[in-house]
Amino acid sequence: MEILDDITVDLSPGQVLLRLRVSPESSDADAVRALLDRVSPLIRPKAIYDLCYVGGKTATTVEIGGVVFRSRVLRVNLDGTHRVFPYIATCGTELEDVPSLPDDPVHRYWLEEIKAMALSAASAHLRQHIEDKYKPGRMSQMAPGSLQDWPITQQTQLFSLFGDVEARIGVRLTDSFLMLPLKSVSGILFPTEISFESCRLCPRAVCPGRCAPYDENLWAERYAEK
């Protein structure tokens, strides 16, 4: 198990303004720059991961690091894979209560987007760290709750791999299986010869996070029990 808590995040005003779609010449730009000046010293994203080995399997379950996960898709995706990298990454608790932040929905939105950028930096750092250290080759990932086949309730099993996650990186799992801080992600990175995107198995028509088109034939072709 390894904690990554020295992650450099260098957010330039230009990057943030572009993300927020705020014109550099607009009246809001100065307010965004002032907010960034205020929160930059507080940006401390973190991640925790472990190298785990794949154990016993059934048609719909797979054991990882001694913990049994129930997902037909995960189980099939790990065929031929012997080691995986469960992880949790977060923007950090330091950004949760920014002193003297105006009680204004626009400022709150700006702050949430800065948190998202910090989380993206943590996720990218984590992936690069694993690639540099373990040389796994091409990797894909899955996350509890991304598919009906692997429900969000399986967050409990994932968190159990790391013990007291809140004490280690500040992320808490609620009774409804959401993570706090909200700008946190969890999942399993795994080596694969065939790239996988959960979106290809999700038929939801409207989804702002979609990163691949739905493939209505993929389940039958690869994941249906024969």
Image (cartoon, rainbow, N blue to C red):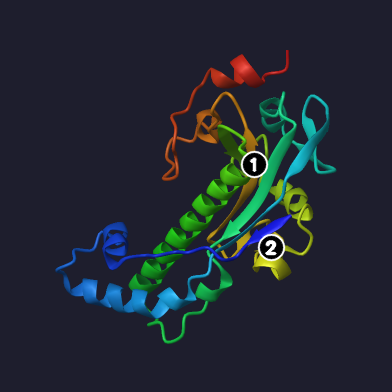
The x and y percentages for residue 139 are 57, 35
Looking at the picture, tell me which residue is in the foreground, 74 or 55: 55
| Residue 110 numbered mark, or none | none
- Say left or right for 183 vs 33: right
Count residues near mark 1 (Cα–Cα under 10 Å), then give few for <14, some for 14-19, many for 20+.
few
Residue at 78% across, 52% down: 161
- The residue most toward the left is 25
The x and y percentages for residue 35 are 35, 77
Count residues near mark 2 (Cα–Cα under 10 Å), then give few for <14, some for 14-19, many for 20+.
few
- Rendered position, 125 above or below 81: below
Q: What SS does tag 2 mark?
A: loop
Mark 2, residue position: 174
The x and y percentages for residue 125 are 52, 53
Instruction: Name the N-terminal-most of marks 2 and 1.
Output: 1
- The residue most toward the bottom is 100
The x and y percentages for residue 184 are 57, 58
Residue at 57% across, 52% down: 126
What's the residue type where badge 1 is placed? Tyr
Residue at 69% across, 57% down: 2
- Say left or right for 75 vs 179: right
